[in-house]
Amino acid sequence: MSTPAAGAPDAAPHDSLSRFYSIIPAGGIGSRLWPLSRADAPKFLHDLTGSGSTLLRGTWDRLAPINGDQRIMVVTGRAHRAAVESQLPDLADHNVVLESEPKDSTAAIGLAAAILRRREPDVIIGSFAADHVIADQRGFGRAVKEAIIAADAGYIATIGITPTEPAIGFGYIHAGGKLGIADAPNAMAVTEFVEKPALKTAKRYVSDGNYLWNGGMFIARADRLLEQLGESRPELLAGLEELAEAWDTSRRGAVVDAVWPRLEKIAIDYTVAEPAAKAGRLAVVPGDFDWDDVGDFASIAKLHAGGRKHDLAILGENARVLADASSGIVVGNGGRIISLIGVKDIVVVDTPDALLVTTTANAQRVKSVVDALKLSGRSDVL
């Protein structure tokens, strides 16, 4: 595959938006949000913002104005189908893709792309996580539309988030020069796609001014994305194409049972984004809108604090909390009265069968508790 020529789209930009299809991968347990987020009730099914809508519903509501509710596909686990469909009543049945077991983002996004390409050979797809929070609909929409046009020019595009701090929980994208694509004036070449850095490196990235956070949003022509995947993981692509060929037929069940278990479990960052960046095929559109991946309880506390460091965020239906001179976050789902006196940056998550107490500074370490519970065989609380 040759590197796309800057400013020379393969199709007219005005046609790009009508061919766009959104994909929402709704998977993952959200282990840093245990014990609130569980295998049977992952974080995308929770209202973590106090808006009255779950994260999944919020994602749908951002995408529907861009391409319509009939052009959104959701990839989720079989166990979550009923919950997903109850929250998204306008989700078309043929746009529900069920995974028999989690295989990470390459399989989820790749299968959706392969299915949609068979239905619409010139389709442009965009993948957007089900569990992110974005309040600026206009800013998000503008960035997505530029990314769609860059994708139609032959690039695999992503939306990079302008950093607000030297975060070590995100990957970073090194943006190069403008690509000169008509109707996508902010699209830039990606010179490097890097993993989560150490704090010293993250500080250097932010001070450099040319690095963006990796928000995990990928927009591409389906044929280009699959072609890139085939270069790095030909066996994985072959399995996904076999599934897609049978998907809209009566053979789907048998083929899924035979093929899905043997698919490689790997993130799309490694199979598509990083190789595309090295080959000069990855474009980035800066996203200046507010964004949060709600990765741990510290980020939820920050969302609810609104910049006020000494506030206490309280979540949970009928949460019963008494607090004096305390800050942090309390999630009360266990029915008990929770009393806090003189504690700062506390995290308390109370559920009927598990209690978590930590601090916002240690919120990322909650995943180690989940790992320990797995090793000890305590799947009953996972």
Image: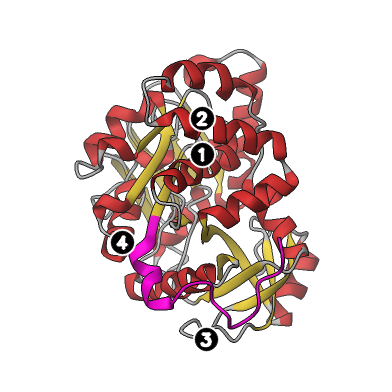
Disc 2 vs disc 1: which is toward the camera? 2
Residue 82, placed above or below residue 203? above
Q: Decide which of tag 2 and tag 3 comes sooner along the chain.
A: 3
SS class, disc 2: helix
Residue at coordinates 43% horizontally, 77% vertically from top-left?
A: 13
Which of the pair 122/330 is nearer the observer? 122
Say whether marks 3 and 1 touch (CB < 8 Å): no
Residue at coordinates 59% horizontally, 71% vertically from top-left?
A: 284
Determine if residue 335 is in view: no
Write down the residue under mark 1. Answer: 111
Disc 2 vs disc 4: which is toward the camera? 2
Q: Which mark is residue 67?
A: 4
Q: Decide which of tag 2 and tag 1 comes sooner along the chain.
A: 1
- Label 3, label 1: how many angstroms apart (C-alpha)? 31 Å
- Label 4, label 1: how many angstroms apart (C-alpha)? 20 Å
Q: Decide which of tag 3 and tag 4 comes sooner along the chain.
A: 4
* Side of 315 relative to 345 (left or right): left
Q: Which mark is residue 243?
A: 2
The colouring scheme, among rainbow, by chain, secondary structure or one colour, is secondary structure
Type of amino acid at the residue the image marks with label 4: Asn
Type of amino acid at the residue the image marks with label 2: Leu
Q: Decide which of tag 3 and tag 1 comes sooner along the chain.
A: 1
Q: Residues within 10 Å of mark 3 (few under 14, many from 20)?
A: some
Count of numbered circles in the view: 4
Write down the residue under mark 3. Answer: 185
Residue at coordinates 36% horizontally, 71% vertically from top-left?
A: 136
Say whether marks 2 and 1 touch (CB < 8 Å): yes
* Side of 90 relative to 140 (left or right): left
Type of amino acid at the residue the image marks with label 3: Pro
